[in-house]
Amino acid sequence: MEKMNGIELFVQVARQGSLVAAGRQLGLSASAVGKGLQRLEQRLGARLVHRSTRRLALTAEGQQYLARCLRILDEVDAAERELQQGLAAPSGRLKVGVPHESGLLTPHLAGFMRAYPQVALDLDYSDRLVDVIGEGFDVVVRGGEPGDSRLSGRKLGGYHMLLAASPAYLAECGRPGSATDLARHRCLHYRFPSSGKLLPWPLVLADGEEAEPPVSASCNTGEALIELAERGMGIVCMPDFSIRRELASGALLALETPQVRRSGNLYLLWPSTPAMPPRLRAFIDYMAANVFAG
């Protein structure tokens, strides 16, 4: 800060040609300008200005230093103009982490791109638990509230877990009438990529104990599980938004029983910051308004 103040003071002295006129521009006394100029020369170890009773004149070193100082101030002005233009309209790159399932989010990501063509989305589709700050994400979409105090969050909407299977599978193996019946069925499980653990199915037996369906296959992406289920390979337990298209088309049928007892919420999570870039604010507002609308 002291160096920038010295540069601005020197440039005004060079432009005005007198300590009094420079002080008038800077809101300082001629004495304060003279002392500031003297400190600058002492720090640089060079005389920048020839002083006389009538007018100041730059030394050769002063002329050289002035040229550099003017370029520095021009760069500062350009940086401020660039930032102000960026604040006026959303633009720039936005790194977004989204679940590998794309049926719910991708149409709205496309809508955002149409609405804000100056924002370049860098989309990272993954089911793993990413390090939002460490991996440089601007925002991620994940289930559950933020557990990291460094993150802020906004709710997108709620979901329910559903059991589903293809019509062909149900015609061959029948519908399970209870959680106990699942022991006789082929069950397709989701495996967390980071830990290798299986996602528990939220089923409760008549005695209150949690059911443990057999593991006929496991997979670390939701899309692959859905495709296996569509091909008649077994029953899946998925969030309702993940299989919305398949349910609507009839490729999968939701099983009313046994009762699935789990619901949750999807959130947008981003690093907490006092000054949110316009492109991030626009993305958060757009997705929150559209993803679960209707």
Image: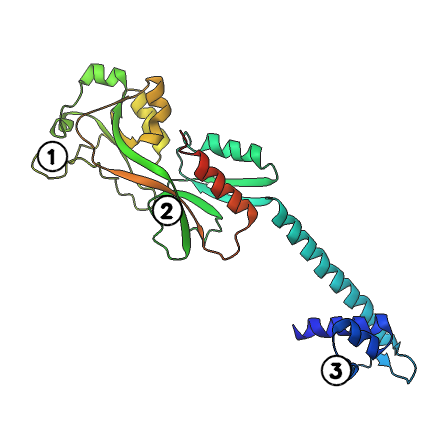
Q: Residue at horizontal 78%, vertical 76%?
A: 23
Mark 1: amino acid: Leu
Element under disc 2: loop
Q: Is residue 224 left or right of residue 135?
A: left
Q: Where 215 falls versus 138 (above or below)?
A: above
- Relative to residue 83, is residue 207 depicted above or below? above
Residue 293 place in picture, x, y as percent? 41, 32
Residue 96 vs residue 231, the one in the foreground:
96
Kind of residue indicated by mark 3: Ala
| For residue 160, side relative to residue 19 (left or right) | left
The residue sitting at 45% across, 34% down in the picture is: 290
* Image coordinates for residue 15, horizontal then vertical, percent: 85, 70
Residue drawn at x 42%, y 34% is: 291
Picture quarter with the C terminus: top left
Q: Categorize mark 2 by other alpha carbons within 10 Å: few (<14), some (14-19), many (20+).
A: few
Residue picked out by circle 1: 205
Q: Find residue 100 and report its horizontal and vertical position in percent.
A: 40, 36
